[in-house]
Amino acid sequence: MTVAAIKPKRVLPGFTLSLGTTLLYVALVILIPVIALILKGAQIGPAQFWAIVTSPRTFAALRVTVTAAALATIFNAFYGLLMAWVLTRYEFPGKRILDALMDIPFALPTAVAGISLTALYSANGWFGTYLAGTGIEVVYTLAGVTLAMAFTSTPFVVRAIQPVLEDLDPALEQAAMTLGASPWQIFRRVVLPAIFPAWLAGSTVAFARSLGEFGAVVFIAGNLPFKTEIAALLAFIRLEEYDYQGAAAIALVLLALALVLLILSNWLQFRSARHLEARS
Amino acid sequence: MSIAIENMTKSFGGTSVLRGIDLTVETGELVALLGPSGSGKTTLLKIIAGLEWPNSGGLNVNGQDWLGLAAQDRRIGFVFQHYALFPHMSVRDNIAFGLTVRPRAERPGKSVIAAKVEELLHFLQIDHLGDRYPAQLSGGQRQRVALGRALAIQPTVLLLDEPFGALDAAVRRDLRAWLRRVHEETGSTTIFVTHDQEEAFELADRVVVMGEGRIEQIGNADQIHDHPASPFVARFMGATIELPIMLSAGRAEAVGLDASRLPRRALPDGPATLFIRPADLTPVSDPSGRWQVSRCASNGAILRLELTDGAQTIPVDLPRRAPEAKGLERGVHVTLRPEAAAIFSGPRQMQTQAQTTEFARKEKSL
């Protein structure tokens, strides 16, 4: 008598179908465009690629983009941490509304954000009028580019830290307190290490998003070549000129920057979270 | 360090959690706060630690007013129920934490701290675990590290919140004996919270029974077991059988009850309630008895009976080989003979009502 091999039944059915759909989606929407971009870039050849990327206008655009994205990320890293802290640690009237407002940059079309920021900060706008007296210019400067990038990427940091702070066991802080730690020591040595991986992850995604931000930036930047022209816009201009190689080269640099950062951040997160896994 | 708590009250929102607590703990004493959940025992412990603040009352330790001191300045060792070890620090760093956060002027040197940590690791019998992270330890090991971290700052008072609540039975027994030894060797004043009677009585010099935000009774195992101070303590100590009786000249009287084994009480005549543990009640075969065996089950050593008089059903435990157990089976009529019991004046009906309102209130506070 032969015994038929037992085929284990999955508790949740539909694995094949759901994984298939997911992979198809990933291929169509993410992988194929990225591969097309890389293939396009590969046709250029290293020497010409280097020539395009280091040409003064392209290089200036990349520099503006990276500088503004870095400034915006530093700002958001601190502002986002503060916001997440306030939203998790304190009870105050209107807390839920503030919590919902955090998502506005996600929900708002970025062009709308760019236009309203421009209107507010232009020489005769609400804020611009006052800033003009102090000699600070926002519209058509690097500050404007940074502002637009910061606006659209805030929620990444807030929403990354918030759940971790909410889950942090209050007993940890109480324990540190009974052991004589000051509030700053408790934050620095107990709270910060716990939220650090999430903080880093949120900040990295915010930076990657800022690198590619287009809609909000083009309105406030003025798009002066060598001064406030961002890389994404320059790629768009190259496309309009039917210079597909130029566009692909710029796009590849942005893609590489974002990828390297994401990988670096994941590695750092892995390192700082290693001890949390049991080694039995 | 002697701790004096005076008339302490505390409420959360509209719910009273402590309703006037007076308690003195002497230097070097090991005291257990015992009570069901919602009795206020953990709140009291957290107030002593400075993690909660009372609405009114006094807290003096060695004559110093602790309600004017922040938790940081009280120098207490607090051990949390779920250990609260810092997950990103090694065992060594966890234990050293309290020393490394001292202000620079008072902070011992690096080598002094390292030596102190080694000494504690040895004392706690976890020498080999120094470089592990909390996630890599078992529950019992984590509890030892948590205690080591608390002891490192040489606390004036050691406070433990359900220290063994999350551990399995064998580890609990081990750690209990070990904690007793730690207490004796460090000579610290220790207060711990538990809902486990066995733990409280085995470990503590004195047990404080708490219920509904009040201290119901203070004493040792025998005192609390044999002479519960209130119906609450009687019930909490396992006297789950409550029978309505009439007292006359200090004797309990009721139909179907043989109270000959109970001593006379100095209580006024009138309605009263008898509180009995299932193991302290002997059913005696009696064809004209008011009670009847309605269920009968044996686990080999103990015979578990259910008796009924038509209105009430009560559980009774007795050794299966006891002479009284012979012939007890379903349908047999019996008379009840309590071997030991507590009696409180007042009809039972009222107390049952009081009990139900107690539960309702407890649920609301959750």
Image (cartoon, coloured by chain):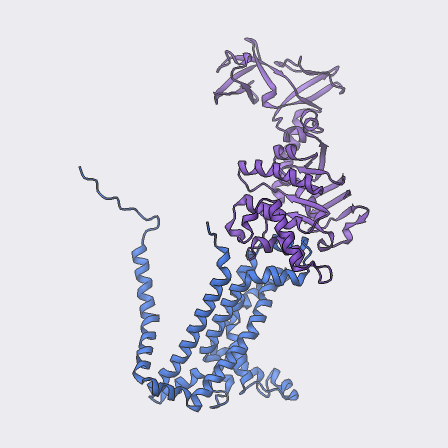
Picture quadrant where residue B186 is located: top right
| Left or right side of A271 for A129 | right
Q: Where is residue A81 shown, x and y percent of the image?
A: 58, 67
Count of numbered circles on the image: 0
Who is closer to the viewer here, A207 or A222?
A207
Above or below A104: residue B115: above
Residue shown at the point (69%, 56%) measured from the top left: A180
Residue shown at the point (71%, 53%) measured from the top left: B71
- Chain B tint in image: purple
- Chain shown blue: that is A
Who is closer to the viewer here, B286 or B75?
B75
Who is closer to the viewer here, A70 or B258?
A70
Visible residue check, residue A103: no
| Left or right side of A113 for A49 | left
Who is closer to the viewer here, B70 or B106?
B106
Residue shown at the point (48%, 52%) measured from the top left: A278
Above or below A192: residue B321: above
Visible residue check, residue B342: yes
Picture quadrant where residue B196 is located: top right
Above or below B18: residue A187: below
Picture quadrant where residue B195 is located: top right
